[in-house]
Amino acid sequence: MSYVKVDVNKPTALMPGNGGNLKDKVIVFDWNDVTSGYVRDASGIVMPGSLIFIPGSYAIKLYATQDSIKSSAESSGDTDAEGIIQNIDFSHPGNLKEIKEFQTSWLGKSIGIIVEKCSDGSMTLFGSPCAPLRLSHKNEWDKDKNVSTMSFKSAQKGPGWADYLGTVTLDAVKGTAAEAATTVNVASGNGEYQLTTGDASAAVITDLSNAVDGGVYTLLGSGGAFPSTIVKGGTFLLHNGTTWTASAGAKLTVKAFKSDTTVTTLVEVSRA
């Protein structure tokens, strides 16, 4: 890890110390389903790539009562043996079958959690492969309330929270490109988009329509006889100018950057 000493001044954001600002859908995944994409940059804080899941595995969304979400990260350990213990708690209304099944099925698992800010869509990742979170829960039902409370805490000391810049594999993709499409419509927002093989030749994808400034999009390879390609130049800025081919299981994550109201550049974040 490399850290350059710099002054840390008061944040310029409006009321940076305010609480809240978190979406009410918490993303939960099992670290045992993740094969790569969790490496942090030299700062030890930013996770620039996208988590890559084994085939057939994915993250899920869990509703959390918005004003109940509470997280903490606390340094712990003796001299020369310090690390960080992470914790995130929230409640879920009621005790229906679905939440009880979740609580039962996720006990004992090596858990990671991602939360997203309402204001700018930025994401924070809790847990790590070697210091995952573990679930504990309590269900209460009395004259005043019917609620399920869950706590996810580090199994052991590890790194702190990560700023996650990638996308997340969920059960459903945001959209599927037409056969041999050269432009992929990403109007559904951040997330994964499935490509489709060509019918007689490999299509060259030249743009993502409806991309927004700062948006992060992952293209999923189709495989097949004529998988699409993305080449350097034009809208796409690829690492080392290396062509990406939409082979089966391949992924390319890009972040949109608008240099003015009409010009968008799609910068490669990671590939697999």
Image (cartoon, helix red, strand yellow):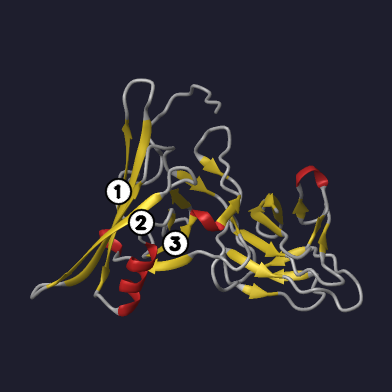
In what quadrant of the picture does the N terminus appear? top right
**Mark 1 Cα shell of 10 Å, populated few (<14), some (14-19), many (≥20):** few
Kindly check if marks 3 and 1 are in contact, taking CB atoms under 8 A apart as contact: no
Residue 2 seen from this side: yes
What residue did someone put label 1 on? 18
Looking at the image, is mark 3 or mark 2 earlier in the sequence?
2
Marks 3 and 2, how far apart in space?
16 Å
107 relative position to 178: left or right: left
Q: Which residue is mark 2?
A: 21
Q: Name the residue beneath numbered marker 3.
A: 27
x, y (%) of residue 224? 82, 72
Q: Residue at x 75, y 78 (%)?
A: 178
**Could you say which is closer to the camera, residue 131 or residue 61?**
131
Q: CA distance from mark 2 to mark 1?
A: 8 Å
Q: Amino acid at mark 2?
A: Asn
Residue at image position (87%, 72%) is: 225
SS type, badge 2: loop
